[in-house]
Image (cartoon, rainbow, N blue to C red):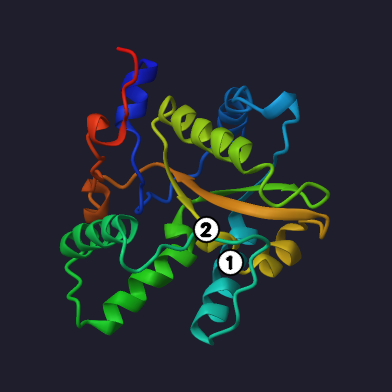
Amino acid sequence: MNIIEAMNARKSIRGFRPDPVGQETIKKILEAAVRSPSAMNTQPWEFFVITGEVLDAMRKQIVEKLNTGAPMQPDHLVVGWPQKSIYRDRQVDLAKQLFKLMDIAREDKEKRAWWLERGFRFFDAPVVIIAVTDKSLSESGPLFDIGAVVNNICLAALEFDLGTCIEDQGVLYPEVARELAGIPDTKRLMIAIALGYPDENFPANQVRSEREPVDQITTWIGF
């Protein structure tokens, strides 16, 4: 698979097989990913790779907090979309695709809650990578670099037939990861990546989200 093929093949995986992923495989993915662009080579990223009993305990505690209405206090502002905007429209379109494939009716509150909970369980992936940065840095400064390295992780994973899903649900209750994974208070939890072998029979994995035509979002000058 060449680079263009990998970029076109990448998609969010929301259903995983329980098969474990070897540490050496993950190390190879990270070794490739950290070659991503970094402003003045500052490399403002670190990773906590979590699996096994610790990850199971994290899932349990996060879901308990979600279901009891515990306040979410993420380390940085998470994405929010204006209600009347093209950005919100795209989000809604994706949700409609997912809910149709998962047979979740709009009025089915129980199934909708189940689906929401799955995200906070890292979609039951066997591995989660949490990308962190140092709190000595500004909140917005490392964002470009973190985004670049996370994208590289997702592309490199394809080389090993692994799927990924980038999700902020995993860092909305940062106190859980701090306690169970030993993430220091000096680190800012930025984003989580669910990682594992895709379950090809899981309906939501059929979704390939649409993209706007390039000519619709590009202004060509001097050509």
Determine which residue is flagged by label 1: 172
- Could you tell me which residue is drawn at 66 percent across and 28 percent down? 38
Q: Is residue 45 left or right of residue 17?
A: right
Tell which of 174 and 147 is nearer to you: 147
* Rendered position, 200 above or below 159: below
Q: Position of residue 54 (x, y in %)?
A: 65, 60
Marks 2 and 1, how far apart at CA: 6 Å
Total labels: the figure holds 2
* Rendered position, 158 above or below 111: above
* Rendered position, 140 above or below 115: above
Q: Secondary structure at mark 2?
A: loop
**Residue 173 lies in quadrant:** bottom right
Tell which of 189 and 128 is nearer to you: 189
Residue type highlighted by circle 1: Leu
Answer whether labels 2 and 1 touch (C-beta < 8 Å). Answer: yes
Q: Position of residue 16 (x, y in %)?
A: 38, 50
* Rendered position, 84 above or below 12: below
Tell which of 125 and 206 is nearer to you: 206
For the C terminus, the quadrant is top left
Q: Residue 168 bears which disc, if any?
A: 2
Q: Secondary structure at mark 1?
A: loop
- Could you tell me which residue is drawn at 45 percent across and 44 percent down? 196
For the N terminus, the quadrant is top left
Q: Position of residue 213 (x, y in %)?
A: 22, 34
Q: Is residue 96 left or right of residue 39?
A: left
Circle 1 packing at 10 Å, graded few (<14), some (14-19), many (20+), is: many
Residue pushed farthest top? Answer: 223
Residue type highlighted by circle 2: Asp
Residue pushed farthest front? Answer: 222
